[in-house]
Amino acid sequence: MARIRSVHPGFFTDEDIVEVSALARLLLIGLGVEADDKGLFPWKAKTLKMRIYPADNVDMNALLSELEAEGLIKRYEFEGKHYGAIRNFRKHQRPKSPNDVHPCPPEILKYVGLEVTDSSNDNAPTDPIPPIGGDDEGQFPPKGENAIQMEDGGWRGSFSNEKQVDFADFWKAWPDKVSKQKAQEAWVQVPHDERAIAARTCAAWHKAWKGRNPKASNISPATFLLERRWTDEGFAAKAQASEGKALRFWADRINSGAFLAEGSVNPTTARALLDEGLVTAEKLKERGIAA
């Protein structure tokens, strides 16, 4: 789940970071964007290459090894899956409402700069939030320098006077709080331009579905997301208003020249923007968006 992150000017003169190659330094910034709010990311070289260096001929395994050798990232295994952790990530990034996406053991929490709470199960993953006191040394960036778009790790702007939605918005709206981990994993697979619709319509959809299927077992939030159930026949009309807001949001971002994460506007959305007359084909081409 890519997020907008802040980069402190001190990053470029850090004694450890300048020891690695320029490509590895750029990768470290890219990993910070791809990581969850604890500084953790799936250790998948091919996927990371496509996300961070899609048009470059680079050896991602070699770059990851370079960062790991310098102690800037650490590879670990949890329940048979491989992940990476960014050293002291949470000493530099302090999201107000952190999302717990990837699991990890307590020693990895210490590595990313989180305090570990007491637990009867030493292998249980947890996501405590470190206390933020008056000492801002090491904050990234220091107190008072946070640009508005960097607060809480995400861009805030004109979207019907609301912030860009994230998993916390969806989870707050979903009626049955079950299988959160699976729901988080499903959320990252939802196209960016559909997340607002998913979050805003999930409660109404759930109520309508329960009304039609009173004796059925509850549907999981992960199923709702993976199957894109907000597009169900007979329910699309309820989502139309939100969909219109989403299109206007993307049109504003495209026409204003604002930052757009790669792939955030898919071809289906691009065609809808053209059909509604909200953007021109020339503007899409200029922004590198296929329709």
Image (spheres, rainbow, N blue to C red):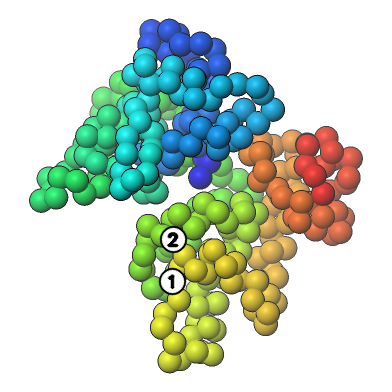
C-alpha separation, residue under disc 2 versus residue under disc 1: 8 Å
Instruction: Give whichever of discs 2 and 1 has the lower sequence position.
Output: 2
Q: Secondary structure at mark 1?
A: loop
User: Is 171 or 120 nearer to us in this picture?
Assistant: 120
**Given the image, on which type of amino acid does mark 2 rest?**
Ala
Q: In the rendered view, tell whether residue 211 sits above or below residue 203.
A: below
Along the line of sight, the residue nearer the viewer: 69 or 97? 69
Q: Position of residue 198 (x, y in %)?
A: 57, 64
> What kind of element bears circle 2?
helix
Locate residue 17 relative to residue 164 in the image: left or right: left
- Indicate left or right for 166 with 113 as reference: right
> Does residue 116 appear in this view?
yes
For residue 220, the mark is: 1
Residue 150: horizontal and vertical position, in percent? 50, 35
Q: Quadrant of residue 71?
A: top left
Tag 2 near tag 1, CB within 8 Å? yes
Q: Nearer the viewer, residue 248 or 83?
A: 83
Please name the residue shown 54% across and 84% down the image.
208
- Figure quadrant of residue 16: top left
Measuring from the top left, give residue 192's x and y in whole percent: 61, 51
Q: Which disc, if any, is residue 183?
A: 2
Using the image, determine if residue 179 lies above or below residue 27: below
The amino acid type found where label 1 is placed reads Ser
Q: Residue at x 59, y 59 (%)?
A: 196
Q: Tell which of 159 and 216 is nearer to you.
A: 216
Above or below for 112 versus 17: below
Classify mark 1: residues with Cα within 10 Å, few (<14), some (14-19) or many (20+): some
Q: Position of residue 245 (x, y in %)?
A: 69, 60
Q: Is residue 40 visible?
A: no
Q: Residue at x 71, y 43 (%)?
A: 253
| For residue 247, side relative to residue 20 (left or right) | right
